[in-house]
Image: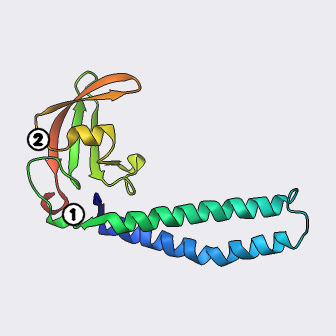
């Protein structure tokens, strides 16, 4: 079973979501019961909606339980080094346009590109792993191949 890295904050967020979803179960079960009492289930939109919600709820619960079981919690404050790894904040420059981007590499369940973090499993994340300052990477993107140069690598515990 492959371990998936996650920050303590990300782990706690998943635990909270799991608790919230489990607390929602009784209401969904009650909605199904009430809709079932209305009679013919073949044309009962309330019943169908409640069953759909139950299916999505149970699927998400199973997903989170599986993710928590395979998570490896990493304390970002203990990380350092000169290579890109989980938890590194990397500044990259587009070799063609000169556009500079800064990304923190996190796990797939806590990455938020709009907030400056990407998954280590994303194409850019995968290309960056193990590289150092000055290295170039090439990523296949919808707009074509993009080359980046790694400008800097920082870690939470070593940022100034």
Packing grade of label 2 (10 A; few <14, some 14-19, many >=20) is some
- Given residues 36 and 15, the one toward you in this image is 36
Q: Position of residue 105 (x, y in %)?
A: 27, 50
Residue 17 bears which disc, if any? Answer: none
Residue visible at 16% across and 47% down? Answer: 84
Describe the element under mark 2 as helix, strand or loop.
loop
Up-down relation of residue 105 to residue 53 (above or below): above
Q: Position of residue 32 (x, y in %)?
A: 76, 70
Residue extending farthest right: 39
**Could you tell me if the residues under marks 1 and 2 are in contact, i.e. CB atoms within 8 Å?**
no
Residue extending farthest left: 82
Residue 76 bears which disc, if any? Answer: 1
Q: Position of residue 64 (x, y in %)?
A: 45, 65
CA distance separating discs 1 and 2: 18 Å
The answer, for residue 160, to whether it is visible in the render is no
Residue visible at 63% across and 61% down? Answer: 55
Is residue 110 shown left or right of residue 156? Answer: right
Q: Position of residue 68 (x, y in %)?
A: 38, 67
Packing grade of label 1 (10 A; few <14, some 14-19, many >=20) is some
Up-down relation of residue 30 to residue 63 (above or below): below
Total number of numbered discs in the rendering: 2
Up-down relation of residue 100 to residue 30 (above or below): above
Q: Quadrant of the C terminus?
A: bottom left
Residue 132 bears which disc, if any? Answer: 2
Describe the element under mark 1 as helix, strand or loop.
helix
Residue visible at 56% across and 71% down? Answer: 21
Dot placed on the residue nearer the N-terminal end, 1 or 2: 1
Q: Quadrant of the N terminus?
A: bottom left
């Amino acid at each position: 079973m492959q371990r998936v890295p996650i920050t303590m904050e990300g782990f706690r967020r998943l635990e909270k979501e799991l608790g919230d979803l489990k607390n929602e179960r009784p209401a969904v079960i009650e909605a199904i019961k009430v809709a079932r009492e209305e009679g013919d289930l073949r044309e009962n939109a309330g019943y169908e909606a409640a069953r759909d919600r139950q299916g999505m709820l149970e699927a998400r619960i199973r997903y989170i339980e599986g993710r928590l079981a395979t998570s490896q919690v990493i304390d970002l404050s203990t990380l350092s080094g000169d290579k890109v790894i989980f938890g590194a904040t990397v500044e990259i420059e587009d070799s063609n346009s000169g556009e500079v981007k800064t990304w923190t590499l996190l796990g797939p369940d806590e990455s938020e590109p709009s907030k400056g973090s990407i998954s280590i499993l994303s194409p850019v994340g995968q290309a960056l792993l193990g590289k150092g300052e000055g290295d170039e990477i090439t990523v296949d993107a919808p707009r074509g191949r993009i080359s980046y140069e790694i400008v800097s690598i920082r870690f939470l515990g070593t940022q100034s």
